[in-house]
Image: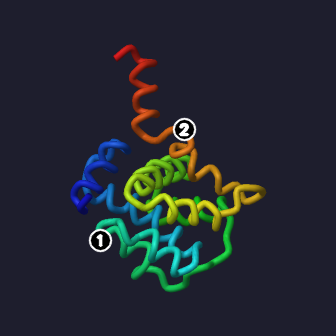
Amino acid sequence: MNFDEFTGEIQHRLELAGTGETVRAIRATLLPLGQRIPEGSATNLAASLPLEIKWYMTGAVNEHGQRFDWDEYLDRVSEIEDTGRAQAAYHARAIIDLVHTQVPESDFEKLREQLPQGEEDWGQLFEIVDAGGWSEIEGDQSDESGE
């Protein structure tokens, strides 16, 4: 998947008006994630992503391996994206689901292992992935609306 396909898919999923908003949502999701996990893990996870997207987890990050919880992550995403926390969480989940489809499963599982799912509640980041992925969620919404 190239940059245009990746951003186009995110724009569709999030129903955003333009590429600028879409890229901002992607950057807002991936930059703090790159800050949270160790540099080697960020590099491995991002390796299968388009170069322009990969940069948000690697080249744009000054300090990898920072310790912060899910709430702080949402604060960072919300600030970068300039949106509310609920919308930031939804955007992050949708973007992480697309990342899941693009990277080796072993790298994605390593990401899960590095984000505590107990008291820090990082499991919320993976809600769409754990529900079967975007196509499953989208299909459920279509079924409910009678389409």
SS for dot 1: helix
In the displayed structure, 48 sits above or below 98; it is below
The foreground one among 22 and 103 is 103
Q: Which one is closest to the eye, mark 1 or mark 2?
A: 2
Q: Residue at x 48, y 58 (%)?
A: 105
Q: Residue at x 52, y 75 (%)?
A: 41
Which residue is identified by label 1? 52
Amino acid type at circle 1 is Glu
In the displayed structure, 105 sits above or below 13; it is below
Which residue is identified by label 2? 131
Q: For marks 1 and 2, give the CA distance.
A: 28 Å
SS for dot 2: loop
**In the drawing, does residue 101 fall left or right of residue 1?**
right
Residue furthest out toward the bottom? 62
Q: Residue 1: image x %, image y %?
A: 26, 58
Amino acid type at circle 2 is Ala
Q: Quadrant of residue 2?
A: bottom left
Residue furthest out toward the right? 119
Q: Residue at x 24, y 54 (%)?
A: 5
Q: Residue 68: image x %, image y %?
A: 67, 70
In the displayed structure, 50 sits above or below 96; it is below
The foreground one among 70 and 88 is 70
Please report whichever mark, 1 or 2, sits nearer to the chain's N-terminal start. 1
Q: Residue 74: image x %, image y %?
A: 58, 59
Q: Quadrant of residue 64?
A: bottom right
